[in-house]
Image (cartoon, rainbow, N blue to C red):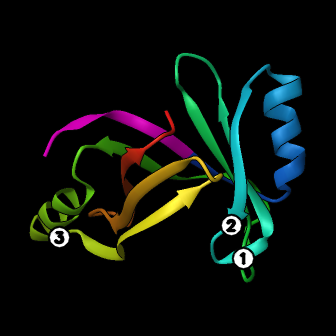
Amino acid sequence: MQFNGFHHIGLVVTDGERSFEFYTKGLGGKELMRFPMPDNPEKTIYMVDMGNNAVIEIIPRGSGEEEDNARWGHIALRTDDAKAAYENAIKAGATSRSEPRELNLGGTMEILLCFVYGPDREVIEFFQVKNGGW
């Protein structure tokens, strides 16, 4: 298993469309893709490249989230083996947030992803691009 840098950083926001407009029209970011939120399909997740593959995932708040301000939600580490990264993290003391699962994003990107909580409950995503995407 090898890590290849960050894949993206997740930003949890109160209004996904407003933040998308800010990061694209306001700051000049380029839309890479959009797709329905897997656990809340009426909301849209946006992937925006801010240059040189510095990608922000704009995540609208789900139900029950009480914070008023946006917050960085997670880091996504690009890897060639998300399952091995997950297993190594668990062995090192991380706790599982979600086990490895395959998804199709935007109809063009096949991925394997999983999440763990680090030592201070920080959220780490292991992100493996299987086909398509960036």
Q: Residue furthest bottom?
A: 64
**Dots 2, 1 in contact, CB < 8 A:** yes
Q: Is residue 66 a member of the stretch shown in magenta?
A: no
Q: CA distance from mark 2 to mark 1?
A: 5 Å
Q: Amino acid at mark 2?
A: Met
Q: Amino acid at mark 3?
A: Ile
**Mark 2 burial class by Cα count in 10 Å: few <14, some 14-19, many 20+:** some
Q: Look at mark 3 in the image and give the residue it sits on.
A: 90
What x and y, as percent, mark residue 61?
74, 67
Q: Secondary structure at mark 2?
A: strand
Q: Amino acid at mark 1?
A: Asn
Q: Look at mark 2 in the image and give the residue it sits on.
A: 37
Residue 85 lies, with reference to residue 42, above or below; the image says above
Q: Look at mark 1 in the image and give the residue it sits on.
A: 40
Question: Which segment is the magenta one?
Answer: 1-9
What x and y, as percent, mark residue 51?
61, 17
Q: CA distance from mark 2 to mark 3?
A: 26 Å
Q: CA distance from mark 3 to mark 1?
A: 27 Å
Question: In terms of sequence position, does the residue under pointer 2 or pointer 3 come before the other?
Answer: 2
Residue 43 lies, with reference to residue 65, above or below; the image says above
Residue 55 in sight in this render? yes
Q: Secondary structure at mark 3?
A: helix
Residue at the spot 36% in from the left edge and 65% down from the top edge: 114
The secondary structure that most of the magenta stretch takes on is strand
Residue at the spot 33% in from the left edge and 67% down from the top edge: 116
Residue 14 lies, with reference to residue 56, above or below; the image says below
| In the foreground, 122 or 15 | 15
| In the foreground, 3 or 121 | 3
